[in-house]
Structures are given as structure tokens and as C-alpha cells.
């Protein structure tokens, strides 16, 4: 099963979250958010906006099981 990492770091006066996929590709927003929760939610929304990335996860899992 692939592992997806969600991390948050402080940037300026706010927080920025990054999602890192098993192949090393990472996504983060250009914006910062006033709370960790808002930054994490924004990163999760960004992942949901890339269905091709989610489909690739399914394909890599299926390939590993065959």
C-alpha cells in the first residue's frame, strides 16, 4: 500500500502544507494559511483536484499486486 505524506511548515506569518506521493512528487499551494488545519485542508483539496494523480496511485497498487 502506498504511503502519502502530509507535512506542514511555518511560512512567514502562516502555514503551508505539502503532500508528497510515493514517487517523490510533491504538491503545495503558493498561499499560506493562518492555521495548520486550514493549510492541511487546502492541501487535501489540491489532491482532490488532481484525479489523475489519484488514479495513478490505484494503478501502481494494482501493478504491485499482480
Image (spheres, rainbow, N blue to C red):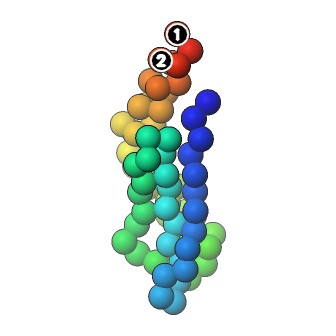
Badge 2 element: helix
Q: Residue at x 55, y 80 (%)?
A: 10
Q: Tally the marks.
A: 2
- Above or below, 25 against 38 in this view is above
Few, some or many residues within 10 Å of mark 2 (<14, 14–19, 20+): few
The N terminus, quarter of image: top right
- Report if residue 48 is visible in the image: no
Few, some or many residues within 10 Å of mark 1 (<14, 14–19, 20+): few
Q: What residue occupies the far top of the structure in this picture? A: 66
Residue 5 location (% of width, % of height):
58, 52
What residue is disc 2 on? Answer: 63
What residue is disc 1 on? Answer: 66
Residue 22 location (% of width, % of height):
50, 41
Q: Residue at x 50, y 72 (%)?
A: 16
Residue 6 location (% of width, % of height):
58, 57
Q: Quadrant of residue 52?
A: top left
Evaluate if marks 2 and 1 touch, with contact meaning CB atoms under 8 Å apart: yes
Amino acid at each position: 500500500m502506498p504511503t502519502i505524506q502530509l507535512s506542514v511548515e511555518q511560512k512567514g506569518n502562516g502555514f503551508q502544507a505539502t503532500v508528497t506521493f510515493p514517487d517523490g512528487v510533491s504538491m503545495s499551494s503558493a498561499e499560506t494559511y493562518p492555521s495548520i488545519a486550514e493549510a492541511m485542508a487546502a492541501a487535501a483539496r489540491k489532491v482532490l483536484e488532481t484525479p489523475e494523480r489519484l488514479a495513478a496511485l490505484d494503478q501502481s497498487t494494482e501493478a504491485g499486486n499482480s
